[in-house]
Image (tube, rainbow, N blue to C red):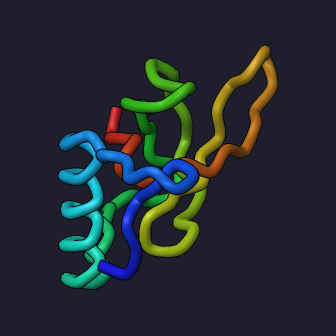
Amino acid sequence: MTTLVTFGHRLTSVPDPIIETLRRNEDAHRRGPQSPPRHDFHAGDSLAVTAGPFAGLQGIFQSSCGDARVAILLDVIGRATRVVLPGSSVALA
């Protein structure tokens, strides 16, 4: 602890859920970065978007973008559009 939480010169209480969130974040920070999940997609694979604003759409895998992201082609308004998404938000269709 470095300082007390105050509002002006008055001490303020912090709700328990916020304290628990801070503790979880601190624990995760101490453990260090976690390895992102690896994916095993190949160029041309048909993928289904399972999470995020494009959930429910299908696309074609183009390439990996680092360890945790993938580039896929989605049909957006009748046009193939390259979109980069977290690898965890897509699955083989």
Report the front residue among 16 and 29.
Answer: 16
Q: Is residue 51 above or below residue 72?
A: above
Residue 31 in the image: above or below residue 53: below
Residue 91 figure quarter: top left
Q: Nearer the viewer, residue 89 or 3?
A: 3
Give the left or right position of residue 56, taking residue 81 as reference. Answer: left
Query: In the rendered view of the protein, which quadrant contains the N terminus?
Result: bottom left
Q: Residue at x 40, y 42 (%)?
A: 89
Which residue does the image show at 51% across and 22% down from the upper left? Answer: 57
Closer to the camera, 13 or 56?
Answer: 13
Q: Position of residue 93 (x, y in %)?
A: 34, 32
Q: Residue at x 52, y 56 (%)?
A: 9
The residue depicted at 57 percent of the width and 52 percent of the height is 8
Image spot of residue 48 (x, y percent): 41, 31
Residue 88 appears at what percent x and percent y? 35, 49
Total numbered badges shown on the rendered structure: 0
Answer with left or right where residue 7 lies relative to residue 74.
Answer: left
3 left or right of 31 in image: right
